[in-house]
Image (cartoon, grey):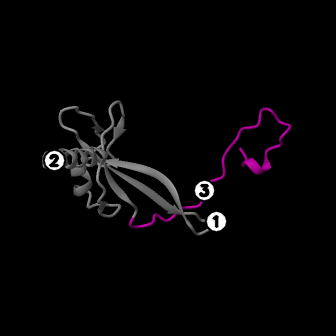
Amino acid sequence: MTSIDTIDPTNRNAVFVPKPRKPRKIIKGTRAVQRDVVPGGYELCEQCADRIKFVAKDHLRMILCNVYEVDASTGLPRWHHLERYHPKCYDEAGQLHGPIADRESSRDKAKRLVEAEVSRRKKR
């Protein structure tokens, strides 16, 4: 077998073998955020390998981590993949990708806006 550079383009029976990639360094401090579990999603936790399930009554959350690696050719960080965790598993793993960024969920924001509107109407 040969690499893609040495394959004869006229040979239809040639086997494609990709070139091995250079090892990449993982960048520390990758962003981690907490989000609602989406109905119908099929995500697996990176730590325990169990499914992160949607439960309507509990409004469970999951941790999403964007993982970046240094591109060997440019030396710049580049998005590589997304990892998902149960909140408990992320803490047990030692918060591998940094602390969870504080950001208000859409459900919490909607709840806060409704409460503000209700209190505004009561004052009238």
Q: Nearer the viewer, residue 7 or 109?
A: 109
What residue sits right under mark 1 in the picture? 73
Q: Secondary structure at mark 1?
A: loop
Q: Main secondary structure of the magenta part?
A: loop
Distance from disc 2 to disc 1, alpha carbons, whole Å, reads: 64 Å
Say which mark, if any, is on residue 29: none
What residue sits right under mark 3 in the picture? 21
The answer to whether residue 68 is magenta is no
Tag 3: amino acid: Arg
Mark 2 or mark 3: name the one nearer the start of the chain: 3
Which region is colored magenta? 1-29
Dividing the image into 4 quarters, which one contains the N terminus? top right
- What residue is at 38 percent from the left and 54 percent from the top? 65
Q: Does the residue at mark 2 contact the one at mark 1 (Cβ under 8 Å)?
A: no
Asked if residue 26 is positioned above or below residue 39 in the image, the reply reads below
Quadrant hosting residue 57? top left
Within 10 Å of disc 2 (Cα), the crowding (few <14, some 14-19, many 20+) is few
The reply, left or right, for residue 62 in relation to residue 28 is left
Tag 2: amino acid: Arg
Q: Secondary structure at mark 3?
A: loop
Mark 3 or mark 1: name the one nearer the start of the chain: 3
